[in-house]
Image (cartoon, coloured by chain):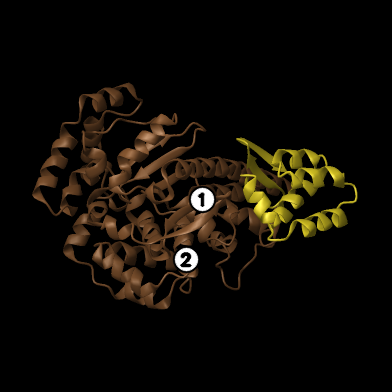
Chain colours: A brown, B yellow
Amino acid sequence: MISPAHRTWVGMAGDERSIRAPMPEGEWLDLVAEAEAHRTVGYLAWAVAEGRVATTEGQAATLRERHASLMRHALVVEASARELVHDVGADAAVLFKGVAAAHLDHEDPSLRVFQDVDAFVPVDAIDHVTSTLEAGGARRDLPARTADWDQRFAKDITFVGVSGAEIDLHRTLVPGPFGFAIDLDELAADTVAFDLGGTAVRAFGPERRVLASALALTVGEATPRLAAALDMVGAFRSGADDAEVVALAERWRIGHLLAEATIWSSRQLGADALPPVLARWAIDRPTRSWERRWRRLYRSAGGTNTVTLLGAPLGMSRWADRRDYLHGLLRPSRAYREARDRSARPREWRTGLRELVRGSGS
Amino acid sequence: MTAAHYARRSGALTRRCPDRTVVLVGGQVHDLLGPSAVIWELLAQPSSMPELLTALRARYASVPASSVDEAVQRMETAGLIEACPSQ
């Protein structure tokens, strides 16, 4: 949950649009920590600069420096995104989340803080994009789990670029069954271009950006971030059609997640933040029993990473895919196991089992 | 050709922050403060080059206009940063 003051600085607080006196240092630090967690430091920095949030000069100076630091990192990430698109082609790496939202769905890119590049890569371009990145010096975090894992089952493939920026290449948008239910061809069917320092890059169209935000708010993270809700609101401001958003969500079997994200965002940002028709639909929409079962697999609803992975076959339509997926999950390649052992990551199944036991005991 | 076109040709990535403009060009990040930040903000406007230069001269009598002119016209972003008043 976000504090009432948070609504003030993201400009959604109706008549109470200002904090008139500087806060005691402890309260101020709590608010800055909240902004960091929700990736809304850009909103807070501008609210202070515009006089909507009163601070001491010391508080303001520290905040300005922190915001500038986050923006320096954002530019390094953007440079990596631009290089990726330049090297592989705009249709092979469709940007979404941070970089795309900053430029398309917020009043100014400096309002949106982000940490990495998120790019959707169509299945038939995955080999091309991963080999191009490797040839350019980017480092893949782990090898493919099995020979065809990247193309069939991976949620994403993580690289660290030469500049140090993380690049997440997404085969689909989220892990678990919902990620497999999304129609990837239809997802890729609508993109828009925008300029990134002289390079034309592509992002999803506004309806798909709404759905990507809804997924981030529900099953993409352990706890929802306000930045994703602001992305969602911004995508509607950019012209997303609410009927089309709902139709896509239902076809991709993520209608429940859209409804949940809509209700959460409306609670945080105000009833008028999202289209009223959508807000009404979200409240009235019945939840099916299978949706409840799928939802409980995710960390944000009490599940664990292991449960999400094991539950993924529920979203697959072919038995052969389920069989191959589970085989790859339980018996990954030697290269994968060795690389994982060398990394600082915890032991996969041991940790998963511990999480399961802890989860069942709570 | 507009000033914004020049900014794009330079390959710079920029962010306008409350007290500065952060610019990444040639792999280096610069924090531009004061007049330098204003120059970058002007560069990001869709104005023509003559309009940009007129605006710069009108705003900053202390800016070495010839250096700025030269850097902008050669589209040398790093040169433009150097030509700006000290930060």
Residue for badge 2: A233
Q: Nearer the viewer, residue A37 or A3?
A: A37
Q: Nearer the viewer, residue A267 or A358?
A: A267
Instruction: Give the spatial CA distance, label 1 vs label 2.
Output: 15 Å
- Which residue does the image show at 44% across and 71% down from the upper left? A274
Tell me the kind of residue under disc 2.
Val
Say which element carries label 2: helix
Looking at the picture, does residue B25 appear above or below residue A176? above
Residue for badge 1: A39
Answer with mark 1 or mark 2, whichever residue precedes in sequence: 1
Residue A343: quadrant of the picture: top left
Q: Percent from the top left, x then y, of residue A91?
A: 39, 51
Tell me the kind of residue under disc 1.
Arg
Q: Percent from the top left, x then y, of residue A170?
A: 34, 46
Quadrant containing the C terminus of chain A in the rendered view: top left
Q: Nearer the viewer, residue A18 or A116?
A: A116
Quadrant containing the N terminus of chain A in the rendered view: bottom left
Task: Please give left or right for residue A174 compared with residue A224 in the image.
Answer: left
